[in-house]
Image (spheres, helix red, strand yellow):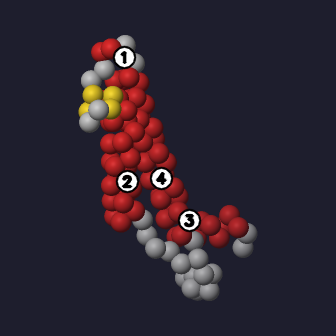
Amino acid sequence: MNNHQASEKDFRFKIANREALLGIGLVLFNFIWWFAFAYGLGGKDPSEYTYVFGLPAWFFYSCLLGVIVMSVLVFFVVKRFFTDVSFDEEEYEDQ
């Protein structure tokens, strides 16, 4: 049996691909969040900026709040959608 046939039969590849797509989705969401706030609110004249806790709103929402939102989102996705899979070959040879 070659590697391609083995990967088609091994369910771990399906799990790994799903988790990789979730990770890519999180990265894209993080970039869109950051870009939207950083350039959406920060793209105007600095004299027109609004401030949150003494920081420009674009910086607060894109950098500080973004880290908090992404940390919570990553924690939720890992707890809810990721699966613990053993890498030992012996357990899966007879399946």
Considering depth in this image, is 17 or 76 the residue closer to the camera?
76
Numbered disc 1: secondary structure: helix
Marks 4 and 1, the one that precedes in the sequence: 4
Question: According to the image, label 3 marks what residue?
Answer: 13
Amino acid tagged 1: Pro
Asked if disc 4 and disc 2 are in contact, CB closer than 8 Å, the reply is: no
Q: At 54% across and 70% down in the image, what residue appears? A: 12
Q: CA distance from mark 3 to mark 4?
A: 15 Å
Question: According to the image, label 2 marks what residue?
Answer: 71
Q: What residue is at 34 percent from the left and 24 percent from the top?
A: 41
Using the rendered image of the protein, determine whether residue 37 is visible from the camera's viewpoint: no
SS class, disc 3: helix
Q: Position of residue 19 (x, y in %)?
A: 47, 59
Upstream in sequence: badge 4 or badge 2: 4
Residue 87 visible, this orientation: yes
Q: Which callout, 2 or 3, points to the residue nearer the camera?
A: 2
Crowd tier of the residue under label 1, counting other residues whose Cα lies within 10 Å: few below 14, some 14–19, many 20 or above: few
The numbered disc on residue 70 is: none
Q: Nearer the viewer, residue 47 or 66?
A: 47
Q: Which residue is mark 1?
A: 46
* Residue type of the residue flagged with mark 3: Phe
- Look at the numbered disc 4 and give the secondary structure of its residue: helix
Q: Is residue 43 left or right of residue 21?
A: left
Q: Report x, y in % for residue 86.
A: 54, 78
| Crowdedness near tag 3: few (<14), some (14–19) or many (≥20) residues, C-alpha within 10 Å | few
What label does residue 23 carry, if any? Answer: 4
Picture layout, residue 7 above or below residue 94: above
